[in-house]
Image (spheres, rainbow, N blue to C red):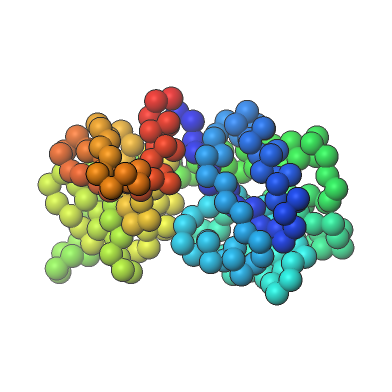
Amino acid sequence: MRQELRILIVDDERPAREKLRRLLVEHAGAQLKAEPTHIVEARDGVEALSLIGQQSFDVVFLDMHMPEMDGLSVAQQLPEPAPLIVFVTAYDQFALQAFDANAIDYLLKPYDEERFLRALQKISKSLALQNKKADTLSEAAPMIIQERGRVIVLAVSDIHWVEAADNYVLLHTPENSHMLRQTLLMTAQRLGSAYARCHRSYLVRRDQIVSFENRLSGKGDGEFQLRSGALVPCSRQYREQILSSLKS
């Protein structure tokens, strides 16, 4: 099964954003063994942080020198767990600061295709390590939930879908629902690659999906039906990623 990647390109220069997008479309599928099915662009650091606050990203290509807020300032404000960062800049004097900010690579403009491919190789190794850790955690670490004076030990494999509820998440099994004080993003990282973001407020376990039904609005939104009979909302931006991964 091929992994989908959510990538954010942050640069105040349009040609620089277009070059990165073109190279990602041409090479990311083969180099990363994943599909960059959701590539988003931001024109400055302020817009980048706003986007990151609304959705999660796996990789951020981040320009170092931008008006209002530079790349280092953006990196320092990323929520945990932070995405992989590749700094892209025309100024080589920031290299040490970039790696202090836990960047996995530093692309110096003007970079060529060969240099970009080396950056993709570093991303590939980092993603593989992340996935290995996430899968190991999913198999070994149950969810510990305190609920009405008792402690519930919930196996991750029993969770079929997850719903955000303010500062909590609802962990849904076929029989019950359990509330945990944790963000949806943290829950997604903890559950691992068996689960997919299908909506701003929902996660779904891929192997529990049996069908997808479009809503009558015509906007591409719909619902996944799970083996248990539960219906889980799916928004248009996530639909094709998940359906494509199920086909492969």
Q: In the image, residue 78 lies at what x, y percent? A: 57, 65
Q: In the image, residue 204 lies at what x, y percent? A: 31, 44
Residue 71: quadrant of the picture: bottom right
Instruction: In the rendered view, tell whether residue 158 sits above or below residue 50.
Output: above
- In the image, 178: left or right of 141? left
- Is residue 191 visible in the rendered image? The answer is no
- Along the viewing direction, whichever of 4 and 192 lies nearer the viewer: 4
- Along the viewing direction, whichever of 129 and 238 lies nearer the viewer: 238
Total marks in image: 0
The residue shown at (49%, 55%) is 56
The residue shown at (83%, 44%) is 111
Quarter of the image with the C terminus is top left
The residue shown at (53%, 66%) is 50
Which residue is most to the top?
248
- Is residue 22 visible in the rendered image? The answer is yes
Residue 12: quadrant of the picture: bottom right
Q: In the image, residue 13 lies at what x, y percent? A: 75, 58
